[in-house]
């Protein structure tokens, strides 16, 4: 005997019947507005049974399964992929949260993530926070609600206790429920797998290379100091200079946004102050590109009057005039590695994969000019 015919609902159901795995799953296929309710009614089964058959969440009696499949075929029902994802314990989507996808640094890393995800048949959902800590937490909450299989944070962490508490409040229950989290860059209090560029060590190596060229007067163009990347790169650069007995005065450290326009504004301010620096370190290549434009606009020759260096080695900097001295990071590989960390089975302790940067001296730096 079949199941009793369910009563006709007063409205479209949006909550599951007993069994908990049905969704109000509107077809986007052949039939006009064919819902899971329509299929269940045609097959003379409950909504939960129809959902189990079409979502393949549990075993259903063969005769009921055949009736549901026949009804779905007759009605040209095509399940809504989004609703199916929500009905399963985990979807085939990965959440990728970065600071600004228009920044070539993040674009290169995202390319690595999407390449690795494609090899596993996974869809990547991308969001830009524009370095807003609250927005980053909000996006994580949204991805939890979407039941993303994994969440990747590929922007710098924040030196912000309130952000750390809010982020952990979102990530901890997500991980306990089986979600996977991996991050790129240093996130001070997050207990998750990490791909960590050696920012402090790379900046220190760059400082030593510039000292070897003969420079003793330096300036730095930085992003917001609440970012762990800023703390690490500026700290490493400053420490290496201090070891050589060379100061980096506070008035020679200009803080702006981590963008091309931020680099332009910071370099312009440096010129306005009449900086004595013979070498300028921009903490990202994107800032260095803006600084190079500002120097050119104000008639300052690079490297004839001032040397300029960046960090990251985004693809375009080799084609600048002059090509930019920088610290090379394998950006696309870093994206692949953070994706692969998220796909590995969970370990008892968080794993950290460290990435070493290599100094690349190019034509934007030279020995300091000789005066007199």
Image (spheres, rainbow, N blue to C red):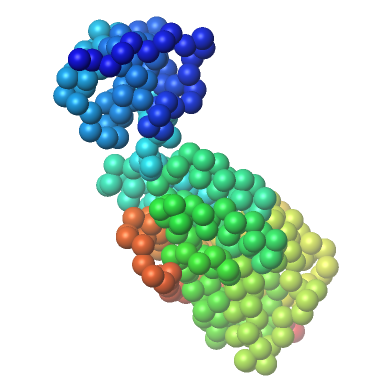
Position of residue 178 relative to residue 19, above or below, is: below
Seen from the viewer's position, the closer of residues 48 and 203 is 48
Relative depth, front residue between 271 and 38: 38
Pick out the residue farthest to the right: 273
Residue at image location 28% in from the left, 46% down from the top: 120
Residue 223 visible somewhere in the drawing: no
Name the foreground residue: 361 vs 238. Answer: 238
- Place of residue 84 in the rendered image (x, y in percent of width and height, measured from the top left): 38, 30
**286 on left or right of 217:** left
- What residue do we see at 78% from left, 64% from top? 271
- Farthest residue to the left: give it: 62
224 up-or-down from 111: above or below: below
Snapshot quadrant of residue 352:
bottom left
Picture layout, residue 359 above or below residue 71:
below
Identify the image quadrant of the C terminus: bottom right
Give x and y (percent) for residue 326.
51, 68
Whether residue 103 sits left or right of residue 258 in the image: it is left
Left or right, 245 with reference to 180: right
Reply above or below: 209 against 317: below
Residue 324 vs residue 150, the one in the foreground: 150
Percent from the top left, x then y, of residue 60?
Answer: 23, 28
Q: Residue at x 69, y 56 (%)?
A: 257
């Amino acid at each position: 005997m079949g199941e009793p015919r369910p009563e006709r609902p007063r409205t479209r159901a949006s909550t599951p019947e007993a069994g908990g795995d049905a969704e109000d799953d509107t077809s986007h296929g052949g039939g006009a507005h064919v819902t899971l309710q329509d299929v269940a009614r045609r097959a003379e089964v409950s909504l939960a049974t129809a959902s189990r058959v079409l979502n393949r969440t549990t075993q259903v009696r063969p005769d009921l399964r055949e009736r549901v499949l026949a009804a779905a075929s007759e009605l040209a029902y095509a399940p809504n992929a989004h609703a199916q994802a929500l009905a399963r314990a985990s979807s085939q989507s990965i959440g990728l949260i970065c600071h600004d996808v228009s920044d070539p640094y993040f674009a290169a890393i995202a390319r690595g993530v999407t390449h690795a995800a494609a090899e596993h048949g996974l869809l990547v959902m991308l969001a830009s926070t524009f370095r807003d800590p609250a927005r980053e937490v909000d996006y994580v909450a949204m991805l939890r609600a979407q039941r993303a299989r994994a969440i990747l944070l590929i922007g710098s962490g924040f030196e912000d206790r309130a952000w750390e508490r809010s982020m952990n409040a979102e990530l901890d229950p997500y991980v306990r429920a089986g979600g996977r989290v991996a991050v790129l860059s240093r996130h001070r209090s997050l207990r998750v797998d990490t791909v960590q560029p050696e920012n402090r060590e790379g900046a220190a190596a760059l400082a030593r290379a510039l000292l070897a060229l003969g420079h003793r007067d330096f300036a730095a163009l930085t992003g917001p100091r609440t970012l762990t990347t800023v703390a690490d790169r500026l700290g490493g650069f400053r420490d290496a200079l201090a070891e050589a007995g060379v100061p980096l005065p506070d008035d020679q450290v200009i803080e702006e946004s981590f963008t091309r326009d931020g680099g332009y504004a910071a370099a312009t301010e440096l010129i306005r102050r009449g900086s004595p620096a013979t070498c300028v370190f921009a903490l990202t290549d994107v800032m260095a590109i803006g600084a190079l434009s500002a120097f050119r606009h104000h008639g300052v020759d690079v490297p004839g009057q001032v040397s300029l260096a960046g960090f990251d080695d985004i693809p375009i900097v080799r084609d600048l005039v002059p090509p930019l001295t920088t610290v090379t990071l394998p950006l696309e590989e870093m994206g692949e590695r953070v994706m692969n960390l998220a796909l590995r089975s969970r370990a008892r302790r968080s794993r950290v994969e460290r990435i070493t940067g290599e100094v690349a001296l190019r034509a934007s730096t030279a020995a300091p000019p000789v005066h007199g």
